[in-house]
Amino acid sequence: MDKKILNLVQAKPKSVSLIDPNIKVNRGYVLRFNYGSEVVDGKRKQIRKDAYLKVSFNHFPKNAFDRQQNTQAGKDANAILDAVKTMIREGKYPIIGSHSLKDAENNFIDWIFKTTQENKKYSDNTKKSYRALVNHIKKFAGNRIPFEAIDKSFVARFYDYLKHESVNSKGISTTANSTIKYHSQFYHHLAKASALFNFELPPNVRYAQDKTDSKPKEYLTVEELKQLIATPEPNFTLRMGFLFGCFTSLAFDEIIRAKYHDVEQDNKGKHYIKLQRGKTTYYNKVPLSNSALNVVEQMREVNGNSSTQSIFKGLKYSAYNNSLLLNWVHRAGINKHITPHCCRNTYSAIHYDKYKDVGALMQILGHKDISTTQRYLATFLKNIDLDVDLLPEFELGF
C-alpha cells in the first residue's frame, strides 16, 4: 500500500461496518473500515481496511449448542463494533493491531469497570450488575489482571469459581442463572478488549450441560398447597400473589403487572384474566377458577376498586420477598426451595396430573408451540405423584 493510502488509513474512518461470516472463504466476522475513495488509473477505488475478528463461528452447526455459540458470536461481534464506533466518536481512530495496552493501563478490571460505568446506554441496574461482576473478578484474581494473563485456563477457572465458590453481598451462594450471566458478561467484554487492544482472545468455555444437569424445578403438590394456605403469612400481598399464581399459571412478573381491568367475564359467565405474555406482543386469556376469583375479591377489599390499579399493589420481585416466601414455606413444614417462579410450576404439575392434556396446558401457559410445553414439563414431570387429585376449591381462611 502506498504512502498516501497509509496516511488515509491512519485518519478518521468515514464509516465502520460489520461483515457477516462467509462460508465460501471460510472466515468469520470482519470489521470493515471505510476511508472514502480515490481515482487510480482513471477508475475510482474504495479505500478500506478489514479487520478479522477473533470471534469463533461454526459454519456447520450440528446441534442447538453450536447454534447457540453462533448466536453469542454475533452478539460479541456487534459489541466490538459498538465499542469501535464509540472510540471513533471520542477521537481515538482505531488502527487495527496498533492500539497499545497502555490505553487501558493493561488492567482488564479497570478497563471493564470504566467501560461499563461510563456507558450512558446502560441502566442503573445494568451498571450495578457489572459492578457485581467486577467484584467477583477481584475476589477470584485480585485487583490487577493484565490482558495477556487471561487465557483458556483463566476463563475455565473463573467459571468454576462462579459456579462453586462465589457468593453475593449477603453471603448467599451465586445461583446457576447468575453464574451464566456473570460469565457471559465477562467473556463479552473480553472479546471487546481483544479486538481493541489486539491480544489473542482465548476460546470460551461453554458448559452446555449446566441447564440439563441443574436440579429439577420445584413445585407444590395439592397437599402441600393446603399446608401453605393453612400457615399464616403476615405479608398479605405476597401471600395472595403467590397463591394467585398457583391458581392461574401466571408467571410472577405477570402477577405483579396484573390490574383489575385485566379481569374479564364472557357471555357464558366465565371469568378470565387477559395479559400480555412476557416480552411479546401476544395476549393470552387465562381462565380463572373460583379460588383465583376469591383472591381478586379479597385484594379488592384491601386495596380498593380502581380498575386501573394493580391487583397486588406494592408486590415486587426482590431478595427480601424471596426470603419471606421461603420462610413461609418452611413454617408450613415443606422442605423445598420454593421461589416466586414455582407458582407457575405448581399449577402446571397439578393440571397435567389430572388431565394429561399438553395441548390444553399449552394454551393456558401461553406457549406458541407444544414442544415448548413438553420441554417445560420435562423438567419436573418425573417427580410428579400421579395420584394427585384435581386442584380443588381452596378455603383461604380469611
Image: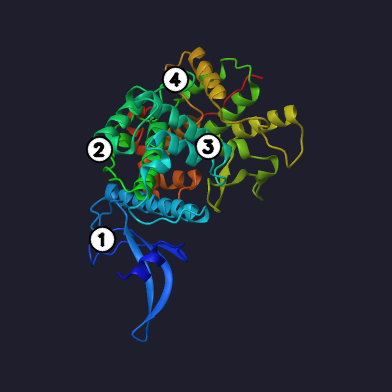
Mark closer to the chain start, 4 or 2? 2
Image coords of residue 276 (percent x, y): 58, 48
Q: Do callouts 3 and 2 mark residues in contact (Cβ within 8 Å)?
A: no
Instruction: Kindly identify the residue that appears in the image at 28 percent across and 30 percent down.
Output: 157
Q: Is residue 175 visible?
A: no
- Callout in the foreground (1, 4): 1
Estimate the spatial distance between the alpha carbons at disc 1 and disc 2, rounded to whole Å.
22 Å
Frontmost of labels 4 and 2 is 2
Return the residue at label 2. 152
**Picture quarter containing residue 218?**
top left
- Relative height, residue 229 to residue 180 (above, below): above
Q: Residues within 10 Å of mark 4 (few under 14, many from 20)?
A: few
Question: Label 2 neighbourhood size at 10 Å, few (<14), some (14-19), many (20+)?
Answer: few
Q: Earlier in the sequence, mark 1 or mark 2?
A: 1
Question: Which quadrant would the N terminus be assigned to in this image?
Answer: bottom left
Q: Residue furthest front?
A: 3
What amino acid does circle 3 point to? Lys
Q: Which mark is residue 74?
A: none
Asked if labels 1 and 3 touch by Cβ distance under 8 angstroms, the answer is: no
Q: Does residue 336 appear to the left or right of 50 in the view shown?
A: right
**Mark 3: secondary structure:** helix
Secondary element type, mark 2: helix
Q: Secondary structure at mark 4?
A: loop
Residue 135 percent location from the top left of the image:
44, 27
Query: Label 4 belongs to which residue?
Result: 172
In primary-sequence order, the first of circles 3 and 4 is 3
| Residue designated by label 1 | 27
